[in-house]
Image: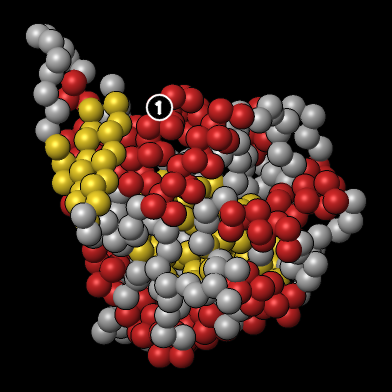
Amino acid sequence: MYLMDKNKIRFLYEINTRVFFRELSFTLGKKITFENFPDKEIDRITSSGFDAVWFMGVWKQSKKSLSLARKNPLLRKEVLNVLPDAEDKDITGSCYSIAGYDIDQSLGTREGLFKLKKRMNQKGLKVILDFVPNHLALDHPWVAKKPDLFINGTMEDYKEHPKFFFKTKEKKILGLGKDPFFPAWIDVAQLNYFNPETRKLMTEELLDIAGLCDGVRCDMAMLVLKRFQKRIWGHRVFGKDRRFKEPKEDFWNNAIRRVKKHYRNFIFIAEVYWKIENELLESGFDYTYDKDFYEALQYEKISEIKASFKDADTHLRFIENHDERRAMEIFGEERSMAAALLTALSPGPMLIYQGQTEGMTKRMPVQLLRTPPEDLNIKLQLFYETLLSTLKGQIPENIRWNIIKPVSAWENNLSYEKFVILCSERKEKIFLGAVNYS
């Protein structure tokens, strides 16, 4: 058996599970689920250099979200931009509008996923799943049966802010899922973490999920912090007649402690922005998104790129994921390879999204089930094969780089400072990395 580092990730492969299984089923001529996921596919992923797979979007799909998605003109326009011949059958509900933390029947069963996890673990692969703390689908059973778990409003709220609230079949006024800077998501209900029962039940969901996988990627993890819930929803977080008190600590502190008490090496990854990454690390997260590094690469902030090599290895870095535009679109072929090398060499794990190594250029909405046809970029494929195999096989995981200052080869050279030169000496071996990012 391959022995994994218990709570470390180096290369994380993000798979859009619904799309991936559909395409694999078409290729193999039979329906692929967690139950019969091919051993050859596991071997392909491990031989590519990955040590963890994030199966994105495995939970029970919302029928309400599906209906709203197919009626949404903005989404349909986005879908047709990348797939002009798309039909209704190619559009599904958002995988972040969760109708229940059960495996969606189109993908298999809990038992099938658990057995696949064991098979992957034996090959050195960890399995990561989604946890969406901020909201649940409009047709999740709790919306009807336990409305107090959510932000409650009044009829006046509903009339004055129709884009922030919705009315249930039971005539309750509940908040739509929201962050402070963007319009509300129309297909999800906002959970209220000032309600002790919400914290209890969502912690129990986490514990249940932890039995199926090696870690979770927590969607928009900062939104359930007390101060952001108060900032967005004001007095409504305290419930009717102010019966809820402000919690002594944020949800994550206790929830992560509870999970790690039962599963000591369980991995928590936070999708987090707004420069509060360290706060979530202190709450118990193992890794946090590093959007600043991505933007430094995008806008050629060389000093910030170099400074990042002194960071701790708790940053999850990427040059694309399902939320961002494709790396080929943002960076182009040559610069995407330079950006990928810098990302791979920097401290912490690297996330690589399905289609990235093949040079896909069209970003798919998560509601789209069919991949737009594109030619494979052989040059990029060979680059990633070399990159991952070289780093996994030869460069130590916890290497610490020194930044070497470049020297201009001629006068008035304006681009030489955009060379990033890295050097490390370890056990009489010298490791050198050089990237021309001009």
Q: Is residue 409 left or right of residue 79?
A: left
Residue under the image location 40 percent in, 68 percent down: 8
**Residue 383: image location, x then y, percent:** 50, 35
Residue 272 seen in this snapshot: no
* Extreme residue in the bottom direction: 262
- The one nearer the camera, 428 or 314, is 428
Residue under the image location 30 percent in, 31 percent down: 435
Q: Quadrant of residue 196?
A: bottom left
Q: Is residue 423 left or right of residue 229?
A: left
Q: Is residue 404 left or right of residue 162?
A: left
Q: Is residue 161 left or right of residue 40?
A: left
Residue 275 drawn above or below residue 334: below
Residue 362 drawn above or below residue 422: above
Residue 85 drawn above or below residue 25: above
* Extreme residue in the top direction: 411
In which quadrant is the C terminus drawn? top left
Q: Which residue is mark 1?
A: 335
**Mark 1 element type:** helix
Residue under the image location 66 percent in, 73 percent down: 119
In which quadrant is the N terminus drawn? bottom right
Q: Residues within 10 Å of mark 1 (few under 14, many from 20)?
A: some
- The one nearer the camera, 377 or 185, is 377
Residue under the image location 74 percent in, 75 percent down: 112
- The one nearer the camera, 146 or 301, is 301
**Residue 25: image location, x then y, percent:** 83, 53
**Residue 40: image location, x then y, percent:** 73, 58
Q: Quadrant of residue 199?
A: bottom left
**Amino acid type, callout 1:** Arg
Residue 28 drawn above or below residue 437: below
